[in-house]
């Protein structure tokens, strides 16, 4: 075409380089999108519920440790056992001889075989009538006896009935209408849904002292687990924060997911080394404001991430499989040491693990050099974490009181997600806060082997159970 010159060699070379970079960027983007499409609960932190109906078969992150499946030798078992003083004894005598057929009406007994049946007796309401007598004094004054605590109406249900309803509502996530139906079917209680719905608030308002005591217990613990998740409350996204130990669970609902919500929970900021905060390595937990406490990162998360990269490209990301195997080996060695009654690994063993970990990190960097453009990408972010937080990742191998993972917090938060699946949301913030406070109480009761119905009954009567402060 007239007026248009042919491009020079240098211009074509520049164009080729630009197109080559663009192709590399597009290839990297396609690879990243394919990687994301391949993520599931097995190789990432995505929840199992996101896998859909085409979810892959489960594959445990555990490795064989030489133990047979099932109950281990010496472990305590649970089985139905005979009692020495049954509530009722029913004698059964044979009517005729099994040999000759003669009657055995007056025959002597020579022994018996006992078989015990454990059964629930017929359930019926027991009605207690409180008669508040009035007495007339010679001075002309008539005095009426005061009603016992909790007896506030001419006719009402007692604390035990209410405790069962709250137990079903909060411990087992049963909707209000179904709780009312269960009470009617099991006990003949014709409770209204309004009465049932108001019971959670009734218990929660009596747990102020329990919550304060539980916060003191958690801030005095040597190892505390933390996690957070999103909830739908009053039509919008809110954030649930949890701080927990094997003996206590504290929930907090907040507008914010980050440090504001963490601080409002009131536990992490109160900890100081040698206390340990266990979490998933989310950045707000690692802010300088929380540098005074020792940290331990969840290695279950790391195993899933490392598995994901190793599955995507075994040749390029062989370092990921090496790191995952090292973490599993460390966990196995710690478990062996604990079973042998030791409280630490041999220094030579731990030094060998650390040296091999360092070599795996270097191999990871060699296989994944930093990109020329901006940003380091997810794989380098993972490698940076493996190098920068080595002490936090391997703290379980130095201190046997620190667990390998953050499963304690994940277990405590999982049941809140179950409630979400059943009910979808909480209609009001106050209702959600009341439910979570009661759930904290029930979870802590269970962890301390306190009978849940007894604990709820005590709370309803104004005397909630409280945990002992750490010594």
Image (cartoon, helix red, strand yellow):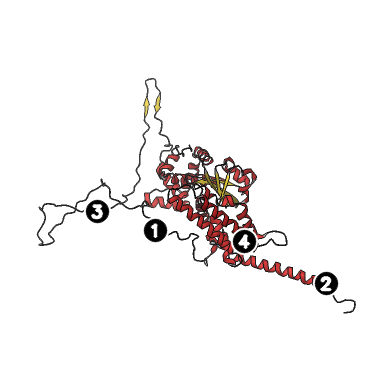
Mark number, residue 363: 4
User: Which sits earlier in the primary sequence, circle 3 or circle 1?
Assistant: 1
User: Which sits earlier in the primary sequence, circle 3 or circle 2?
Assistant: 2
Disc 2 versus disc 1: distance between alpha carbons?
A: 71 Å
Q: Nearer the viewer, mark 3 or mark 1?
A: 1
> What residue is pinned by disc 2?
11
Q: Nearer the viewer, mark 4 or mark 2?
A: 4
Disc 2 on helix, strand or loop?
A: helix
Q: Using residue 29 as the reference point, say whether residue 75 is left or right of it.
A: left
Disc 1 on helix, strand or loop?
A: loop
> What residue is pinned by disc 3?
115
State the image coordinates of residue 156 (x, y, percent, origin top left). Answer: 41, 41
User: Which sits earlier in the primary sequence, circle 1 or circle 4?
Assistant: 1
Disc 4 versus disc 3: distance between alpha carbons?
A: 67 Å
Disc 4 on helix, strand or loop?
A: helix
Relative to 21, say whether 403 is above or below: above
Disc 4 versus disc 2: distance between alpha carbons?
A: 39 Å
Mark number, residue 70: 1
Mark 1, Cα crowd under 10 Å, few <14 / some 14-19 / many 20+, is few
User: Which sits earlier in the primary sequence, circle 4 or circle 3?
Assistant: 3
């Amino acid at each position: 075409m007239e007026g248009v010159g042919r491009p020079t060699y240098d211009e074509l070379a520049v164009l080729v380089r630009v197109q080559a970079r663009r192709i590399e960027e597009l290839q990297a983007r396609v690879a990243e999108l394919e990687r994301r499409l391949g993520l599931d609960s097995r190789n990432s932190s995505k929840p199992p519920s996101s896998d859909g109906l085409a979810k892959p078969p489960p594959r445990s992150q555990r490795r064989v440790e030489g133990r047979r499946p099932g109950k281990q030798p010496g472990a305590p078992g649970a089985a139905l056992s005979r009692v020495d003083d049954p509530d009722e004894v029913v004698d059964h005598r044979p009517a005729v001889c099994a040999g000759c057929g003669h009657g055995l009406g007056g025959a002597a007994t020579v022994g018996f075989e006992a078989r015990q049946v454990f059964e629930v007796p017929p359930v019926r309401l027991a009605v207690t009538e409180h008669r508040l007598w009035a007495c007339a004094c010679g001075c002309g004054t008539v005095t009426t006896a005061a009603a016992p605590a909790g007896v506030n109406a001419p006719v009402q249900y007692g604390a035990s009935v209410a405790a069962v309803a709250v137990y079903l509502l909060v411990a087992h996530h049963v909707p209000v209408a179904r709780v009312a139906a269960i009470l009617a079917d099991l006990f003949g209680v014709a409770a209204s849904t309004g009465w049932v719905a108001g019971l959670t608030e009734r218990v929660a308002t009596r747990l102020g002292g329990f919550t304060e005591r539980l916060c003191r217990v958690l801030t005095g613990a040597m190892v505390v687990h933390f996690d957070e998740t999103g909830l739908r409350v009053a039509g919008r996204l809110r954030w649930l924060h949890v701080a927990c130990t094997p003996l206590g669970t504290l929930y907090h609902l907040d507008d914010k997911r980050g440090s504001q919500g963490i601080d409002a929970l009131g536990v992490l900021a109160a900890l100081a080394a040698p206390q340990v905060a266990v979490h998933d390595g989310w950045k707000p937990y690692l802010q300088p404001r929380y540098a005074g406490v020792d940290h331990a990162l969840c290695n279950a998360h790391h195993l899933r991430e490392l598995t994901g990269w190793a599955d995507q490209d075994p040749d390029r990301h062989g370092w990921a499989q090496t790191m995952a195997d090292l973490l599993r080996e460390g966990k196995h060695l710690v478990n062996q040491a604990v079973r042998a009654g030791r409280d630490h690994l041999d220094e030579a063993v731990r030094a060998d693990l650390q040296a091999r970990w360092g070599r795996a990190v270097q191999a990871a960097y060699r296989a994944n050099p930093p990109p020329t453009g901006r940003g380091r990408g997810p794989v380098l972010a993972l490698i940076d974490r493996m190098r920068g937080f080595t002490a936090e990742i391997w703290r379980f191998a130095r201190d046997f009181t620190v667990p390998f993972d953050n499963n304690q917090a994940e277990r405590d938060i999982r049941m809140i997600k179950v409630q979400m699946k059943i009910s979808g949301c909480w209609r009001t913030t106050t209702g959600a806060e009341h439910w979570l406070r009661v759930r904290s109480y029930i979870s802590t009761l269970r962890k301390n082997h306190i009978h849940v119905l007894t604990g709820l009954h005590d709370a309803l009567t104004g005397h909630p159970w409280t945990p002992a402060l750490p010594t």
